[in-house]
Amino acid sequence: MQAFSYVRPTSLAEALAVLAREGEGARCLSGGTDLIVQLRERRRFANVVVDVKRIPDLNVLSFDPQTGAIIGAAVPCYRIYSHAALAAAYPGLMDAVKLIGGVAIQGRATLGGNVCTASPAGDSIPALMVHRAVVVIASARGTRTLALEDFFLGPGKTVLQPDELVVSFKLPPPPPGFGAAYLRFTPRNEMDIAVVGVGAAITVREGQIVDARIALGAVAPTPLLAREAAEVLIGKAPSPEAFEEAARAAQALARPITDVRGTAEQRRHLVGVLTRRALMQAAQRTTLYA
Ligand SMILES: Cc1cc2nc3c(=O)[nH]c(=O)nc-3n(C[C@H](O)[C@H](O)[C@H](O)COP(=O)(O)OP(=O)(O)OC[C@H]3O[C@@H](n4cnc5c(N)ncnc54)[C@H](O)[C@@H]3O)c2cc1C
């Protein structure tokens, strides 16, 4: 592995000063489950590794039924699914954080790391998208926020500037009649990367779908918010027929490739199956918030 220096700031201002000074040479480290591998394989380069786990702003984990959730970028998966109120409010995200790696990985891996690695197959991303997550980004120049679906530029590429880091994710509170789910297909049950991942969320009022989101992983250069597929559901009753129609629309939006884990044809088929199933599961969960 290349040599690098290591700093462990205890305040956001201190971390941002290092990023401003070091620019491209600095790399944030959260759980390290991606970064250490990336550095060892020389897929990423760092002069200075900035360990962000001790920064209070990145460790916030809160839920308020009126204002929603704030999940610090350095909060590991196990803390997220151990938070009972948060787990009940954001079932799609819970599906994803319980799938990432195995129990040992979930003790380290964070949403900040999963999102900033920007893998098209990152499991938390479609789930966060269907929960309408907003990314809070900070630099010494100030703070900005952005919808998660606008964060990705390509595989491993995001809108983050070298002097910026992700502080947290903000999720709006689930409205009455809300349900969500995240499903993925992997050849093995765990410790594998999604061949396809699908997040789905619907809000049902008086028997009609009034809001819907569908997000797809591993079928395009970036995780994809399938807006047009969700739109076909609006005004319809939650039913197998409506979900089938949305699933076909999601298949049409997917731009899968063939690689070692699956063919484009298999991936497109899986988008249909998983979209339908994720919508069914989201519908079953709407009763929890009726
Ligand atoms: C055995 C194994 C199994 C895995 N299984 C899965 C899986 O099932 N699903 C899945 O999606 N992933 C999986 N992964 C990948 C990895 O665990 C996840 O992507 C994890 O969420 C990364 O989080 P981290 O905190 O470890 O990130 P790190 O390794 O600390 O960081 C990852 C990247 O994000 C950057 N970064 C981290 N925090 C910030 C921040 N706050 N601001 C800006 N940049 C930041 C780092 O510089 C680095 O480039 C697996 C990895 C291993 C080793």
Image (tube, rainbow, N blue to C red):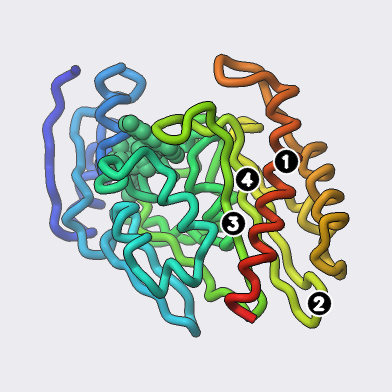
Q: Which residue corresponds to the image point at 40% horizontal and 75% vertical from the top-left?
A: 85
Dot 4 or dot 3, earlier in sequence: 3
Q: Secondary structure at mark 4?
A: strand
Are the residues flagged by discs 1 and 2 in contact, CB closer than 8 Å? no
Q: Which residue is mark 1?
A: 273
Split into quadrants, the picture shows ligand 1 in the one at top left
Secondary element at tag 3: strand
Mark toward the start of the polypeptide (4 vs 1): 4
> Could you tell me how far apart the alpha carbons at marks 4 and 1 are, in whole angstroms?
10 Å
Name which residue lies at 69% across and 49% down.
277
SS of the residue at dot 2?
loop
Indicate the quadrant containing the N terminus: top left, top right, bottom left or bottom right: top left
Per the rendering, the mark at residue 181 is: 3
Residue 178 horizontal/vertical position (percent): 64, 72
Label 4 near label 2: C-beta < 8 Å? no
Whole-Å distance between the Cαs marked 4 and 3?
Answer: 8 Å
Mark 4 belongs to which amino acid? Val
| Residue 222 visible somewhere in the drawing | no
Q: Is mark 2 within 8 Å of ligand 1?
A: no
Q: Position of residue 201 (x, y in %)?
A: 65, 61
Mark 1 Cα shell of 10 Å, populated few (<14), some (14-19), many (≥20): some
The residue carrying pointer 4 sits among few (fewer than 14), some (14 to 19) or many (20 or more) residues within 10 Å by Cα, namely many
Q: Are marks 3 and 1 in contact (CB under 8 Å)?
A: no
Which residue type does callout 2 highlight? Gly
Residue holding disc 4? 198
